[in-house]
Image (spheres, grey):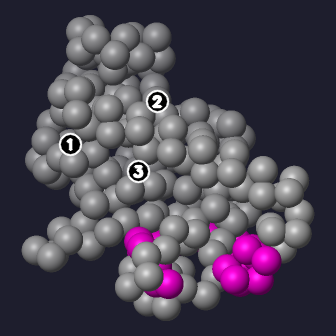
Amino acid sequence: MFQAGDPMGYFYKVTKGIALIFRSLQDGRRQIVGVHSIGDLCGYLEKDATYNFSGVALTDVEACSFHRRRFDDLVARNPDLGSALANDMSDKLKRAAEHMAVLGQLKSTERVAYFLLQLAEVYNRKMAQSEPLQLHLTREQIADHLGLRLETVSRSFTVLKNNRLIGLVGSDAVAILDRRRLAEFARLGTV
């Protein structure tokens, strides 16, 4: 969809599907900073008139594109639109702050539990998807998002499965078996 460092022209509002927003690190690794779905804006953040992050379609994605400079002019003339954009950015900042707290405070398996609950909420609220939860993400992508190693994410899925909090459905889906206990585990680290 867009590449960090490229000149910024357009940003996007996802109308269908899921997009990953990430930054590539110098050693070849990447840090996934966002999983965007229906209604989310992506590609809006810039640095020196270039995209600050990269964005790729994780599933089939449909999106509306907006020319950044023309959109900024439109916002300047329409305060209601500017207010809606400010609210969207505020929501993104809240999610980013919450994600940083998760990375800083939760242990690895707690992070995975929290991630599954958040993903289930987004899918249910925005895409009307329910159980089983189609991840659309590889274990490696989940690790990149949570600041973990691939092996750690795999072990965490096993721990959650062995404690009967989740069930694995094939290689790309998870059934949340006990949402209350999974939420307690994500918050307290105890089963």
Determine whether label 3 and label 2 are within 8 Å by CB: no
Q: Which residue is mark 1?
A: 153
| Gap in angstroms between the C-alphas marked 1 and 2 | 15 Å
> For residue 126, which quarter of the picture?
top right
Judging depth in this view, the residue of 78 and 119 nearest the camera is 78
Is residue 143 found inside the magenta-colored segment of the image? no
Residue depicted at x 77% and y 83%: 70
Residue at the far bottom: name it: 7
The image quarter containing residue 59 is bottom right
> What secondary structure is found at the residue carrying circle 1?
helix
Q: Percent from the top left, x then y, of residue 10?
A: 64, 82
Q: Earlier in the sequence, mark 3 or mark 1?
A: 1
User: Toward which corner of the image does residue 14 lie, by quadrant?
Assistant: bottom right
Give percent across and percent down for residue 25. 20, 71
Q: Quadrant of the image for the C terminus? A: top left
Counting from the top left corner in percent of width and height, residue 112 is at: 30, 35
Q: Amino acid at mark 3?
A: Asp
Q: Tell me the tag on residue 172.
A: 3
Dot placed on the residue nearer the N-terminal end, 1 or 2 = 2
SS assignment at label 2: helix
Q: Is residue 125 left or right of residue 182?
A: right
Residue visible at 49% across and 91% down?
A: 7
Front: mark 3 or 1: 1
**Tag 3 and tag 1, C-beta contact below 8 Å:** no
Q: Amino acid at mark 2?
A: Leu
Question: Label 1 crowding class (10 Å Cα cut-off): few <14, some 14-19, many 20+?
Answer: many
**Type of amino acid at the residue the image marks with label 1:** Val
Position of residue 154 in the picture relative to residue 145 (left or right)? left
Q: Which residue is mark 2?
A: 117
Magenta-highlighted residues: 49-73
